[in-house]
Image (cartoon, helix red, strand yellow):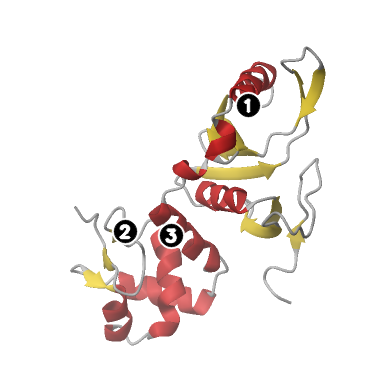
């Protein structure tokens, strides 16, 4: 059985279409706090970028998509349901509702007015704060590393243990490819190093796209 086969289904209260000629849609999984895989869907490429950047940020605990709707009053005066795209929960307990929209839509007066109404309806019952995410909020380096962490999210116990043992002997800043060669592990251990980086050891230079040439160290690099 594939490690990803036994996952919990999406918790979204609004179905996301499985395919669309107009949107980049799909579903993937992340490792939940209890170690199981949790499915979540996304209805655009921007939602996909946002979700991965949330899941692999420090302090992440949970991410839910398409929350149960909140009733908001439109500019017309009519009341209508609004589905928030995501709710990010941090280990601190803070809940952040996220509305994901392209910048050209997020800047419209009607949308901004609606978000104020949504915030009034959702805080504090649904979330502690509401943030709007546009493409300008997606840091390309952060997204690159989030994609890498996501690709490496499934453990390989034997290889992971070998890398963990080898890292105990790391005394000086060393490129990943050099570390893997000198330890005798070889290129097959790259994802294990990536998982170790995500856990906080070894450290890498900040604001860097992680790759085989990335320098790792047992201590923070300044």
Residue 36 at least partly seen = no
Residue occupied by mark 2: 208
Residue 5 is marked as none
On-image quarter of the N terminus: bottom right
Separation of residues labelled 3 and 1 (CA atoms): 31 Å
Q: Nearer the viewer, mark 1 or mark 2?
A: 1
- How many numbered badges does the structure rendering display? 3
Say above or below: 152 vs 71.
below
Residues at marks 1 and 2 touching, judged by CB atoms closer than 8 Å: no
Q: Relative to residue 79, is residue 44 drawn left or right?
A: left
Q: Earlier in the sequence, mark 3 or mark 1?
A: 1
Q: Residues within 10 Å of mark 1 (few under 14, many from 20)?
A: some
Separation of residues labelled 2 and 3 (CA atoms): 8 Å
Instruction: Find residue 3 and report its horizontal and vertical position in percent.
Output: 67, 71
Residue in view at x 37 percent, y 86 percent = 186
Q: Secondary structure at mark 1?
A: helix
Near-viewer residue (32 or 127): 127
Q: Relative to residue 88, is residue 76 drawn left or right?
A: right
Residue 145 is marked as 3
Near-viewer residue (44 or 184): 44
Q: Earlier in the sequence, mark 1 or mark 2?
A: 1
Near-viewer residue (24 or 206): 24
Q: Earlier in the sequence, mark 2 or mark 3?
A: 3
The quadrant in which residue 203 appears is bottom left
Residue occupied by mark 1: 111
Separation of residues labelled 1 and 2 (CA atoms): 35 Å
Q: Relative to residue 122, is residue 218 drawn left or right?
A: left
Instruction: Find residue 90 and report its horizontal and vertical position in percent.
Output: 53, 38
Residue in view at x 53 percent, y 38 percent = 103
Instruction: Find residue 196 and report its horizontal and vertical position in percent.
Output: 41, 64
């Amino acid at each position: 059985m594939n490690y990803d086969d036994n996952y919990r289904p999406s918790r979204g209260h609004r179905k996301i279409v499985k395919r669309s000629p107009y949107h980049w849609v799909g579903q993937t999984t992340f490792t939940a706090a209890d170690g199981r895989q949790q499915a979540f869907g996304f209805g655009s490429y921007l939602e996909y970028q946002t979700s991965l950047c949330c899941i692999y940020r420090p302090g992440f605990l949970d991410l839910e998509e398409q929350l149960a709707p909140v009733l908001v009053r439109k500019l017309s005066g009519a009341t209508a349901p609004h589905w928030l795209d995501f709710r990010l929960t941090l280990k601190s307990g803070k809940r952040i509702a996220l509305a994901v929209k392209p910048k050209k839509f997020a800047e419209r007066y009607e949308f901004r007015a609606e978000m104020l109404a949504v915030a009034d309806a959702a805080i504090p019952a649904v979330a502690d704060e509401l943030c709007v995410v546009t493409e300008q909020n997606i840091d390309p380096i952060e997204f690159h590393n989030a994609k890498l962490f996501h690709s490496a999210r499934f453990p390989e116990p034997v290889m992971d243990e070998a890398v963990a043992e080898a890292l105990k002997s790391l005394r000086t800043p060393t490129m990943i490819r050099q570390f893997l060669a000198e330890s005798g592990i070889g290129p097959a251990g790259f994802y294990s190093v990536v998982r170790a980086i995500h856990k906080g050891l070894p450290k890498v230079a900040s604001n860097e796209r992680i790759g085989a040439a990335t320098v790792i160290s047992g201590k923070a690099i300044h």
